[in-house]
Amino acid sequence: MSTALPLYAQLINLFAAVILLLAFAMLAQRRVLLLIDLFALQGFTLFLSTLVVAVKTGQHHLYWSAGLTLLLKVLLLPWILHRLVRKLQIKGEVEPLINIPTTMLVGIGLVIIAFNVALPISQLSHTITRGTLGIALAVVMLAFLMMITRKKAITQVVGFLSMENGLFLAATSATYGMPMVVELGIALDVLVGAIILGVFFFQIRDQFDSLDIHHMERLKDN
Amino acid sequence: MLDMFVVMLAIPLVSGALLTVFGERAWAPNLNIIASGGTFLAAALLTVEIVTHGPRFAFGEQFFIDSLNIFFVTLTAFVGLTTSIFSGPYMKNEAAHGRLTIPRLRLYKSMYQLFMFTMLTALTTNNLGILWVAMEAATLTTVLLVSLYRTPASLEAAWKYFILCGVGIAQALFGTILLYFAAERVLGETGNALLWTYLVNAKAFLDPNIMALSFIFLLVGYGTKVGLAPLHNWLPDAHAEGPTPVSAVLSGLLLNVALYAILRCKVLADGAIDGNFAGNLMMGFGLFTLLLAAFFLSRQKDVKRMFAYSSIEHMGLITFAFGMGGAVANFAGLLHMTMHSLTKSAIFFAVGHATQKTGTQMMEDIRGLIRINPLIGWGLMLGTLAILGMPPFGVFASEFMILTHAMKYHPWATPVLLLALGVAFAAIFGKVQPMVFGETEAKRLPHAPAITPVFLHLAIVLMLGLYIPPYLTRWFQEAARMLG
Amino acid sequence: MMISLSGLLGQIFSIALALVLAPLLTGWVGMCRAWLQSRSAPPLLQPYYMLRKLFNKDVVLAHGASSLFRVAPFVVFGCMVLACAIIPSLSTNLPLAPAADALALVGVFGLARVFIALAAMDIGTSFGTLGGRREMLIGFLAEPALLMVIFTVAMIVQSTSITTIVETLGHRELAIHPSLAFAGIAFTFVSLAENARVPVDNPATHLELTMIHEAMILEYSGRHLALIEWAAALKLYAYSCLGLALFFPWGIAGGDSFLALLAALPLLLLKLVIGGSVLALIETVSAKMRIFRAPEFLGTAFLLAVLGLLVRLLLELKA
Amino acid sequence: MPNLLAIDYLLIAASAWAVIGLIGLVAPRNTRFIAKILFPIGAAVGLLAGSVALLALGGTPQTAVLVIGLPDLPFHLRLDNLSAIFILLLGMVAAGISVYAAGYFREGEGTAPGLLCLEYHVFLASMLLVLLADDAYAFMVAWETMALSSFFLVTTNHQQESIRRAGFLYLLIAHVGAIAILLSFGVMTSGSGDYSFAGMRAQQLSPFWASVAYLLALAGFGAKAGLLPLHVWLPEAHPAAPSPVSALMSGVMLKTAIYGLLRVSFDLVGTPLWWWGVVALAVGLATALFGVLYATVQSDMKRLLAYSSIENIGLLGVGIGLALIFHSYRMEGLAALALTAVFYHSLAHAGFKSLLFLCTGSVLHATKERSLGKLGGLIHRMPWVAWLALVGVLASAGLPPLSGFVSEWLLLQGFLFSPGLPHAWLNMVVPVAAAVVALVAAVAGFAMVKFYGIIFLGQMRETSLKHAHDAGPWEKAGLVWLALITVLLGVLPATVILRIDAATRQLLGAGLAERLQEHGWWMLAPISPERASYEPIIFLVTIVLSVWLGRWLVHHLYHGRTRRSPAWDCGYHFQGPRAQDTAEGFSQPIRRIFEPMFRMARHFPTARDKQPYYSVQVEDHFWHWLYLPIARLANWLSTLITSLQGGRIAIYLMYSFITLILLILVARP
């Protein structure tokens, strides 16, 4: 089956695989700055894949989408995050709540689940790159896992943004893009959200003297 | 002729922008109220138009107003108006107590208007993508509102709110993408594949497998915002730590809007999938939420937190009702949403004033409200009794329909309902009664509280418990029919 | 309702007879007791002498006595008269009988008891309340037992009307009812307790640890005391007649004729004489119980009565 | 003028009550206006409602539909014979209580008089609507409004924590009961979607679902009535409320629960199964015995009456059970006998228990004391109240010739025929139940003697009691009215039963009227005079005659000199009022005999105590066996569940994650 695939499809699948790989890499990464770089790399791969889809299908809103991805996820957000890390003097180590090998094992399990769930669905699709749907789901889940297992607020944010990457992958590669207005809105939300988060970090640091989320466990019922 | 729809959306957007700039002026609070009043007026006129002329589109086909969402729009605009009236003196008192600065008040007002805008957009849009965008935007605006006090607790609450709802909303987006994925096969790669009006016509042709997966993601995603257990964890924190008007609109409106999103998706899922797949899921979530929230209630110390759990409980009940489906249950669900919005916001108004009077949110320190201010005391007491489903208040009317309907079609669920309602009653009433009754030393507030909204809401709830006007009935029935 | 003249006469006669015979019966029991205890007996008319003396004495009322205290003796006396009026002693043709059946009869005794207990509490001495409490204790145990006895009998004849019971039991062919044996024993127990007899109470004592009836009437004097004493005698008479009517109904006149009534009189006297001596015998051979044995005693009576009822249901209905 | 039906008058009465309440709200602090004008008008309205109901008895059912209610379910109202009896009860008793209240609410209670007036009259109006309601929604709205208004009345003096707790417990149990009733209605509609009672009657339920409906109704109405084990609110709430409210709650509100139970089990649910009756009988017996035993050991006068109410409700339960058993075997004549006993006892209890509660109100006002240990000798200071209370006490003790005896007599007559039941076990076990009824009736006498003797008789236990004053004219009027009801119900049973027979006939198709009509109005012979008869009027006349005759003879034959002297003190001169029996002492025999029934905490003095004291506290086993374990379980569950909200965001995310994964894996269309 794979031999019959045209080049662009192979490319897209390749990019998708790279995104998944990067998601795993992020899950395994201990250092914050490197994590942000990996995130930027993931964004870049996403940009490439979107670009390929845009070129293939000729839908010009996908170009916009790709451009936005490049702008936001490869340049702006990593830059903001880098600045934050430096300004807030966050320690380089990311301390996971669960050790990394275990996390990786769970991650592999998640990928299997994601593929299994996506398989019957993607077979229904008429797009050739439908296989990426499973990868997108896996990326979303891995990002989710990262958010669960990391202690620092900033890694949670990276996980959150990485989840958006997974969603974008699904939106562009699996369905060849959502309607323009939707993508614009999503991008806007992500941007505003990131800015608000940035503001938040300063406030959190002011109040808690740290960005460790375990300081923020006071509101509870038990 | 002026398009009331455009007016309705424009007023909060423009006034939000204005307030961002001029929010520190003396007339700013009044502008907030006037803008909300204008929104409500426009919504009311729009309602009249929809009722007389039937559903309509706006901005091409991107917006669509039918009997289902016009009902939510009116409710949202109304509660938005009363909350803004309430928040006038409330926020002044907060400022007088030194809990808020003038710039924060500006932020509050502008975000409030923008929040109204996002909710009205979410309610009226025909595009499920835009619905998602508006929901996310509503989250963002309310995150700023929740963290308004900038205390450690409020920041923590806002952070949790942001992350949990952000993740939730992200799942909803995945669900939306899957929906698009399914719709695209039927409707083609036009931009219409996310338009609800198209989807609903083609719903029978959507692939059931994809729709099932999509609905799961949408339910978990938007369900996080509704506060379905076990996705509810952000809700009590956000309600307790934000300013009380924000708690009122969160409980009274935002939860409704999120549930509205689920309902729109449920219609599509029901069309695509044989059997009551979506309904069963919702019933399961609803019951679980109801039961869990009831037990949570009995352990609360903070009054706003407790009523936040009460909102969760009622959302569970409403979700259960919609899960049962059918004309009666949907009717009851819609009615309950209305009643819950009105009652819960009234309670939060009363609670807000009460906490200002006593200077604490801890229930064991609040005593004898009926002595400090009989109106606040009675407002809280009656509101609590109403929310607990005591007739002749309207909440009972909907609970009556839900319970008897459940007894009829899902008798296995009734022990759970009975248990949860009983536990919730014991928990809430046992805590509110000593707050209202008993002895205490009084304290005067710098600004007289706005009691009118409390009793206005309660009066409406009382009236609807005894008499639902026929046009309202028709409207509800029409909406219930749309939900299948 | 037609009341025949003879019926009316019979009714008045039976009431008058009760008023006359009751003190005599008390006197007879006293005599028998004395004989059995080898004492020289008081005269048979001793109760009459006592009544006359009491009626002639001044009434000494305690300071705290209220009007209830003064009304109570009359009410108690009235209740006992009514009780004697409706229990067939000579004839079942009693115009007043429909006014109260056996259940109402229990009510009449209850009414009298409540009044005397309340009167006892009225002065506010420790004796009075003690007596009132003990009387009510005896009462609430004896009353259901009595009711159950009546129930057992009533089920046999399917009626609670005492006259019907007597007519049915007395004027039909002999049938053996084992349940009646249980009921009879229970009734004896109850009668002993209700009439303040040994082993439950001792009518002749004023020892504070044991007395019940006497503790209640300590503050009474003069005509009030006379009425109470007379009422007590009437009560004994009423219980005796009730026992005779329920368990030995033979010989009680059924018809209208005044002659039959007269003919029944000697038989009644005989039965009363035997009953009185049996009572004296029981009182002599048994020892006075501690007050807290009384509930056990009466509880036994209650259980016996219920047992009688069960025997009736189990053996006699199934057969 | 339009031709108004009885039901229209009743609607007018209900609205009049509501309007009176609202007027009270207009002048919330004007005590004089509210007490002396509004309450008497309310009493007149009650009298009107009662009279209308009395006239409507025996007529054909009348219906009305209001505009208010749910969209497809406007309020349906219906006046039939069953509701007429209870409206008669409500109207007549409420009239007396309202007149009394006009004198009672003189100075400010915890709540403003205007508000109190509103709550009181809304309470009355809602009870009337409960009795008229003909669909589930109207019934539930009226029912819960009744609970709510009475809750606010109970918590009138909400400054006291114990009263708040009592109110909470009351409303909680009322609410849980209401949900059970609601579910019962839900079962009875059985999918037809027709919530009107007419619709429920038309349903043919399977035995299983009919039983579910019946048991739910029994639990729900039992919670309101105070049937075991849902009685715990009653001895808390009744003493907490102001006395007229206690009187209304005990006298009337409990009867609405009986009404509801009768409505469901005899009218709506269809043919009963035999064991339904057994359940009601057993629960009723247990309740009656429990209530009366606890009544005897109380030392608070209103609690004593509250427990006595539990006892009476138990007896009503016994009656309902017996009627159900007979009804299920189609022995309608005997069922009618038992049912008549139920109706009669409802009426009787409403009269005498309201009377007694009002008497305690007067005592409370005169002495500021509720504890029996601090009362005594009030007959000297409050002769009116004392003598009227005696009427209530005798009736409550079930003594002839008052009202309480008639119903007990009817009930026992019913038991007498239970061996005829065509069921091997029942015909043996049920008659034995009569033994328990007899025991209950006898112990009730004990409790009532204690109540009356300790409050009104003896010496005053506190010196402050010397300043006690008798009830005012309004209060007297109310008391006299209720005492009159009690006496009339006692001496005219045949007349009353002929009027209420229509309801029995409506529910069972059989009644006692034919038999009764064969004899005079003075004679109560439900089967035949040979079987059993009772003529209270003759009874009364005979006793009065003999008393009078005795008195006349004594006064004419002997000189009537009386002297006063101190009571005999055994030569010990220091016998003060303290030497009398205390409330605890009086009930000591009961505590001793029925020791396992009570949960007692006793402290005995020892020889070495510096300040020796004796104390005994009796608590309810049900608290410790049922309610506290439930509370503990709920608490434990809450602890378990609240640990879900542990504050860690990672854990929260995990919940969401696991939910999602589980749904993806498990949920399939």
Image (cartoon, coloured by chain):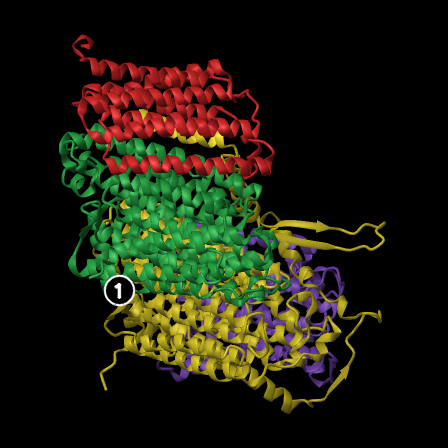
Chain colours: A red, B green, C purple, D yellow
Q: Viewer-proximal residue, C205 or B406?
A: B406
Query: Depth check: A24 or D219 in front?
Result: A24
Among the 4 quarters of the image, the one containing residue D108: bottom right
Quarter of the image for the N terminus of chain B: give it.
bottom left
* D35 to B377, vertically: above or below: below
Query: Is label 1 in a helix, a strand or a loop?
Result: loop
Quadrant of the image containing the C terminus of chain B = top left
Q: Label 1 sits on what residue type?
A: Pro
Residue C156 image offset from top left, x and y in percent: 39, 57
Pick the front one: A59 or D157:
A59
Report whether D580 appears left or right of D341.
Answer: right
Instruction: Please state the horizontal and vertical placement of residue D491, each as a whole percent of the image.
Output: 44, 77
Left or right of C215, for residue D348: left
B286 left or right, relative to C19: left
Q: Residues within 10 Å of mark 1 (few under 14, many from 20)?
A: some
Q: Position of residue B53 (x, y in %)?
A: 16, 59
Can you say whether D254 is above or below B217 in the image?
Answer: below
Regarding residue C244, the answer to whether it shows in the image is no
Chain ID of residue with mark 1: B
Residue sitting farthest toward the top:
A3
Asked whether residue B1 is in view, the answer is yes
Question: Which residue is at the front of the view, D298 or B364?
Answer: B364
Residue B459 versus residue C152 in the image, above or below? below
Return the residue at label 1: B469
Position of residue B152 measured from the top left corner of the image (x, y, whole percent): 57, 41
